[in-house]
């Protein structure tokens, strides 16, 4: 039932899940991953516009929205998530665009000179929390040190799927979590084996 290659959700989820098994580390990521995405969009609001819709004609009433790199990032994430899983992916895509709208509104209100300071403070807090989660509780380096793109792309979706599974027992298709758990167990066994070899 899983996808193949780039859209193999089981493989991506297992890769990310192997780095996030500790409940406290998972909670830290649940709290901090989406704010990292949101504040990144705040900063990207100040990139040059590809196209500014003419709000004065009533075509685009939310005049603070600009089609720039912030919009492009939200779109790329949204498309990937829907391709991974129609139901949870659609929810994730909606969250991506809500983040874009909210970040655009906030950035527009704050202005660049204040916005970058808010973003810097938020990013420092969120990243520090995650590194503490890995160093103190997970006792394993973050996934981004092994696969930067995969970790950044999957993090928000992984968090959302974790929340949906916990709250309503959601899985993209029957047997998904059992299959992912088997892959995670195999990955952790391999990691422990490599760690033992380095020690010996």
Image (spheres, rainbow, N blue to C red):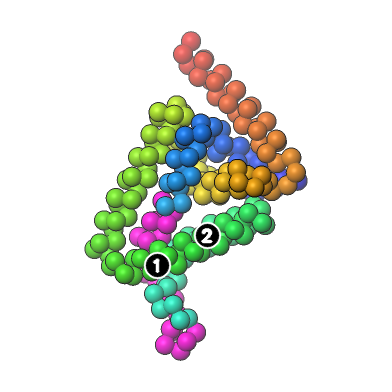
* Residue closest to the eye, 143 or 63: 63
Residue that extends furthest to the bottom in the rendered view of this protein: 57
Asked if the magenta segment contains residue 139, the reply would be no
Q: Position of residue 41 (x, y in %)?
A: 41, 60
Residue at 38%, 69% (x, y): give it. Answer: 105
Q: Report the span colored magenta.
A: 36-59
Could you tell which of marks 1 and 2 lies nearer the N-terminus?
2
Residue at 60%, 43% (x, y): give it. Answer: 166
Q: Position of residue 150 (x, y in %)?
A: 53, 44
Residue at 50%, 38% (x, y): give it. Answer: 26
Q: Position of residue 157 (x, y in %)?
A: 56, 49
Q: Say above or below: 38 vs 192.
A: below
Judge from the rendering whether residue 199 lies leftward or rightward of residue 46; answer left or right: right
Tag of residue 146: none
Asked if the magenta segment contains residue 48, the reply would be yes
The residue under label 2 is: 95
For numbered disc 2, what is the local secondary structure?
helix
* Residue closest to the eye, 51 or 31: 31
Q: Are there few (<14), some (14-19), or many (20+) residues within 10 Å of tag 1?
A: many
Q: Position of residue 99 (x, y in %)?
A: 46, 61
Residue 16, image quadrant? top right
Residue that extends furthest to the left in the rendered view of this protein: 113
The residue under label 1 is: 104
Q: Are there few (<14), some (14-19), or many (20+) residues within 10 Å of tag 2?
A: some
Q: Say above or below: 105 vs 146.
A: below
* Residue closest to the eye, 194 or 85: 85
User: How many numbered dots are placed on residues in this image?
Assistant: 2
For numbered disc 1, what is the local secondary structure?
helix
How far, Cα to Cα, is label 1 from label 2? Answer: 14 Å
* Residue closest to the eye, 32 or 65: 32
Residue at 66%, 36% (x, y): give it. Answer: 180
């Amino acid at each position: 039932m899983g996808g193949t290659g780039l859209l193999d959700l089981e493989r991506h989820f297992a890769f990310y899940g192997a780095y996030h098994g500790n409940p406290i580390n998972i909670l830290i990521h649940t709290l901090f991953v989406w704010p990292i995405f949101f504040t990144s969009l705040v900063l990207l609001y100040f990139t040059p516009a590809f196209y500014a819709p003419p709000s004065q004609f009533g075509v685009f009433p939310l005049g603070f929205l600009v089609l720039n790199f912030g919009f492009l990032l939200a779109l790329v994430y949204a498309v990937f998530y829907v391709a991974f899983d129609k139901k949870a992916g659609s929810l994730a895509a909606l969250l991506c665009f809500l983040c874009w709208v909210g970040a655009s509104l906030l950035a527009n209100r704050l202005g660049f000179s204040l916005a970058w300071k808010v973003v810097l403070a938020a990013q420092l807090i969120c990243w520090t929390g995650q590194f503490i989660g890995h160093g103190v509780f997970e006792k394993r380096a973050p996934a981004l040190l092994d696969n930067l793109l995969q970790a950044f792309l999957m993090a928000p979706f992984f968090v959302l799927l974790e929340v949906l599974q916990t709250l309503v027992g959601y899985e993209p298709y029957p047997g998904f979590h059992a299959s992912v758990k088997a892959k995670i167990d195999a990955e952790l066994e391999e990691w422990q084996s490599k760690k033992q070899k380095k020690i010996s």
